Amino acid sequence: MVVESLKKIHGTHELPSGEKAYWDIGIDNLEIKQSAYKKQQSVQVANRAPKEAYLDLIDFEKIIKQPNNWPHFEPIFNIPFQGEKGKKYYLGWLERLNELRRIPAHKSPYRTFSDDDLEFVTWIKGQLFDKFTEAGFDVS
């Protein structure tokens, strides 16, 4: 959803640099771009996906918060935790989701999901599905 939105916001046309506008303008952070490129280049040419396929989940927080992107993403991704107030960005849920993603990604019999973790995943899934649907994205 983020990459597709960047394409709509900044365009898919090629810039004088040879990069697509959504990539060059939509992602200001040089470290994010370099990391994705490095990961892409480590895959055999026949199996390479576009650079955006190599973005990490936590990279999206920086991309979403980028000043020229935030107005477009705020209605969808600005989701406060219960009782959370007084912030410009309510993206703590993305950090928590990234932490929980590590449990199955780095399997260990000592790391399992708690009931609170599962409740959080159910809650954020509902929030995102509702907001994606309202924004016109197909979530099926």
Image: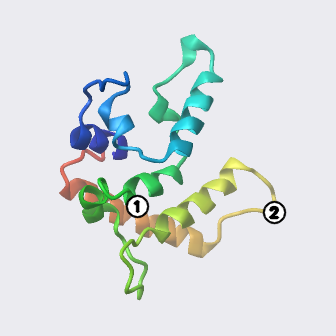
Residue 30: x %, y % from top left? 51, 43
Colour scheme: rainbow
Secondary structure found at label 2? loop
Q: Is residue 82 above or below residue 54?
A: below
Horizontal placement of 7 versus 33: left or right? left
Q: Residue at x 71, y 63 (%)?
A: 112
Residue 68 falls in image quadrant: bottom left
Q: Which residue is mark 2?
A: 110
Q: Residue at x 42, y 85 (%)?
A: 84
Percent coordinates x, y for residue 82 in the rendering: 41, 84
Residue 125: mark: 1
Question: In what element is the residue under mark 1?
Answer: helix
Q: Quadrant of residue 20?
A: top left
How crowded is the residue under tag 2: few (<14 C-alpha within 10 Å), some, or many (20+)? few
Residues at marks 2 and 1, CA–CA distance in whole angstroms: 25 Å
Q: Nearer the viewer, residue 50 or 15?
A: 15
- Residue type, numbered disc 1: Lys
Residue type of the residue flagged with mark 2? Tyr
